[in-house]
Amino acid sequence: MKKGIYILLCILWVTIQSAAQSTHPLTDEATRLFDQKDLKSAQTIIQKALNDPKEKGDSYTWYVAGFIQKEIYKASETNNRTSPARKEAVRLLEKSIVLDSKREHTEMSHAALRYLAVSYFNDGLTRTREITKESAHEPEELYTEFRRIMRIINPSADFNEYDKQIFKALGEAHYSMWENDSKDAAAAAKANEYFQKVLIIDDNDCEALFDLVILNYNQGVYKIRSIDLNTDLSDLIPMQESAIRYFNIALPYAEKCFENCPKKVEYYKGLMFCNRSLGKEERYLELKNELEQFVQNQKR
Amino acid sequence: MRARLYAICALFLLLIGGYSARAQKLDESDTRALIHANFMYQFATNCNWPAESKKGKFYIGVLGNADVFEAAKEKFGAKPVGSQIIEVVSLTEIPTTQLFHIILVDKSKKAELPKALRELKNKSTLIVTNWEGALSTGAHINFKSLDGSIRYEMNENAILDRKITPGVKIIQWKVG
């Protein structure tokens, strides 16, 4: 009896194996090589599978191909923002989803795509730290790809938090560009544009509010600092008035930040300095006293 | 294989966030002090002092405002006015012996103005102040705030009494 069952199981196992092998042998070979961490050979074999008439119509083959490409990206191209392997992985996984009419592998493809999408997002953020005038468009391009992929995973995805993060990072990046070259008014204008975009999403975003205080206030200070010994009296007054315009722009942001955000030393200072620069000395001194109290209370 | 690949996917999801490169900082410079200092330099270069005051250094004293003193010192200390080199001095009281070409009496030292007027009566010292009503109490030039902008009013006759001639530009840009 036991022997009979054993023979039956063997027959069943052989049948399953042969059925599986006959469905997509190249894909299975690629996965076997992948298991052995031989990514290069796995990639070669899966390419054959993608061109094989019997296997190229199977969404699983495309999923495995995408997965292998993703692993190649992870193994050797994570420092490459323009990684061809990542791009190819996305393409293959997208194709797998299109072919997956029974939605057998879609969930797995989504998981792999999510990983890749997030890598685009992180690259976009990282890139903001090192942009120049010439490469200023790159973070947004990477971010656009993140959004595109995420929409494949979830067409109704909410990007507000991601938008805020990238816009703030881009605003700060352009602010740094302005700081490095204070004559670059376009960089300051761009920084302003990005911070304003954050406020469109969330008009109480404390970081963006304070970024706008810094951006405008410091531009005013820069105007005053640029008055030098060669500045004629007839230029000094218009330069001062130009600075005052910036302080006046910064003030409402400083007030909103101070009123609506959790108290911070920097928020006190933002409002204090705007008031001082506009000659509102009483308010400046009042805030200065409040700040001293606040600092003392924090120490306790 | 399929289950295993899925598990790997889940394991390697990256975490979004943690990005914070907030390097932006407020410039804490006292902009009012910087402007006061710049105006003082304009007064120095756009007024004419009597010949006997054109020897040695050009002294600018600041009484009661450390920020203006620092700004002035940093901005034009040791720079020339004609053939004289500017020296900016932080004062603790009205100087009675040494000639100062310009003295700024800050509002925190308002009570010192009468003394300054009395002690410097016979000297070619331009007395500059920064509070409302100072001109009517004898200051030569007084800073005032107009819509947040620092401007100045002046008493030309009082300046001429000290044998100092204000230049055309100084007169042109005064207010009040």
Image: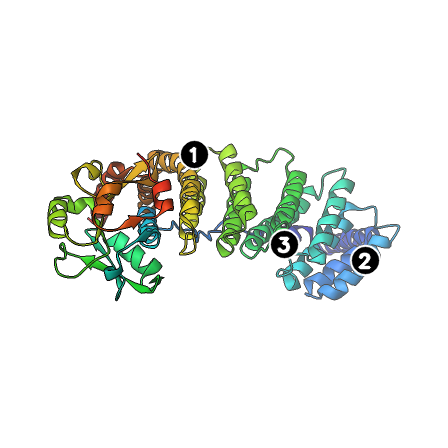
> Which label number is shown at residue A172?
none
Q: Amino acid at mark 3?
A: Ser
Task: Tell me, yes or no, if residue A156 can be seen here.
Answer: yes
Q: Chain of mark 1?
A: A
Q: Chain of mark 3?
A: A
The answer to whether residue A62 is above or below residue B77 is above
Which of the two marks, 2 or 1, is nearer to us in this view?
A: 1
Q: First in sequence: mark 3 or mark 2?
A: 2
**Residue A120 appears at what percent x and percent y?**
62, 50
Q: Amino acid at mark 1?
A: Asn
Residue matched to label 3:
A135
The answer to whether residue A39 is above or below residue A2 is below
Q: Amino acid at mark 2?
A: Gln
- Mark 3 vs mark 2, CA separation in Å: 34 Å
How many marks the image carries: the answer is 3
A85 or A200, which lies in front?
A200
Figure colour scheme: rainbow
Label 3 close to label 2 by CB (< 8 Å): no
The answer to whether residue B143 is above or below residue A29 is above
- Residue in the image at 65% along x and 38% along y: A151
For the residue carrying disc 1, how many other residues have a C-alpha within 10 Å: few (<14), some (14-19), or many (20+)? some
> Which label number is shown at residue A47?
2
**Residue B166 appears at what percent x and percent y?**
31, 47
- Residue in the image at 75% along x and 38% along y: A102
Which quadrant of the view contains residue A74? bottom right
Residue matched to label 1:
A204
Q: Secondary structure at mark 3?
A: loop
Judge left or right: residue A29 versus residue B84: right
- Mark 1 vs mark 3, CA separation in Å: 30 Å
Judge left or right: residue B14 versus residue A28: left
Q: Are marks 2 and 1 on the same chain?
A: yes
